[in-house]
Amino acid sequence: MTEKGYRVLQHIVAQLDKRAVALVIGAPDAHLVNDYFVEIQALCARESIPFQRRTAGRPTAATHALAVAWRWLITDVDKLIVLHDSLLPRYRGFAPLVSCLLNGEPEIGVTALYATAEFDQGPVLAQVARPVQYPITITRAIALAVECYLELTTWLWPGLCAGALPPGTPQVEAAATYSLWRDEADYRIDWHRDSAYLRRFVDALGAPYRGASTLLDGQLCRVLAVEAVPDVVIENRAPGKVLFVRAGQPVVVCGTGLLRLTALRTEAGADALPLRQFRSRFG
């Protein structure tokens, strides 16, 4: 699934041995602007690789499977290897890359591990990391993660083809952390947070995700890009209120700091800038 799955499949076709791929299973994801489902399906058709939708029924049992950006339960596989978007045992669970960026982690990475009954707790086969510098968009972070995916796939492929992978290294449970699943409520901007965090929030939830959300005059809008603005002393600080409008772009008060909204869209996709009314409050 997603761009990560597509790039891994491209890499297998171009650089590795696609003959080892017995079946590719894909599924659309309505939460993403582009889930790469069509691209994956088309690549399989061009390369004569069998393809099946997740909902098409139980696939032929396999001895090994590789799960890339997959979020459903997989059964009937003796050895299931998962590529997970964090350096385990930290950030087990859901949307780990987004959580890493929100927390301002100095590096991101991907872990290859064996699947077990409990998600993301299996023995680790290998890990690859990349340093990050902020500000960084989710698009750029995904590109770095894809590099990690390709490196790990290259390392795994000979063992997968031969059916002879190492047993892996147990994770240190005392160091484990978890990343919760996200829904639409988690896209909403809390203007009481500091501007540095909110800059990361907007950057981490951009395309392929729908974008950080806020209300403007009761209408849901997507904040797609922001810039940090030096703070000023505000005697009656009220997060979410517009303090300045510069070239039609609102400068919004945060819990600490200020943010200038440089790209703002309505939920229908219309440009919401320049701001029509100076006395506006985002919520």
Image (spheres, helix red, strand yellow):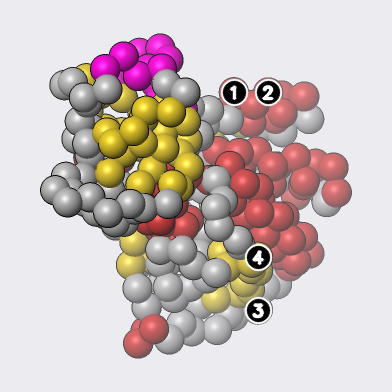
Q: Which residue is mark 4?
A: 130
Q: Which residue is mark 2?
A: 42
Residue at point 65% right, 65% down?
130
The amino acid sitting under disc 2 is: Ala
Can you tell which of label 1 and label 3 is closer to the viewer? 1
The answer to whether 99 is drawn above or below residue 35 in the figure is below
Can you tell which of label 1 and label 4 is closer to the viewer? 4
Q: Which residue is mark 1?
A: 38
Q: Earlier in the sequence, mark 1 or mark 3?
A: 1
The amino acid sitting under disc 3 is: Pro
Badge 4 density bin: few <14, some 14–19, many ≥20, Cα 10 Å: some
Q: Earlier in the sequence, mark 1 or mark 4?
A: 1
Query: Of residues 163 and 253, which is closer to you in this image?
Result: 253
Q: Which residue is mark 3?
A: 166
- Marks 2,1: beta carbons within 8 A: yes
Q: Is residue 106 visible?
A: yes
Residue 272 on the magenta segment: yes
Query: How many angstroms separate mark 1 from mark 4 (CA)?
Result: 29 Å
The amino acid sitting under disc 1 is: Val
The answer to whether 217 is drawn above or below residue 98 in the figure is above
Query: How many angstroms separate mark 1 from mark 3 (CA)?
Result: 34 Å
Residue 264 on the magenta segment: yes
Residue at point 47% right, 30% down?
262
Q: Secondary structure at mark 3?
A: loop
Query: How many angstroms separate mark 4 from mark 2 (CA)?
Result: 30 Å
Q: Secondary structure at mark 1?
A: helix
Badge 3 density bin: few <14, some 14–19, many ≥20, Cα 10 Å: few
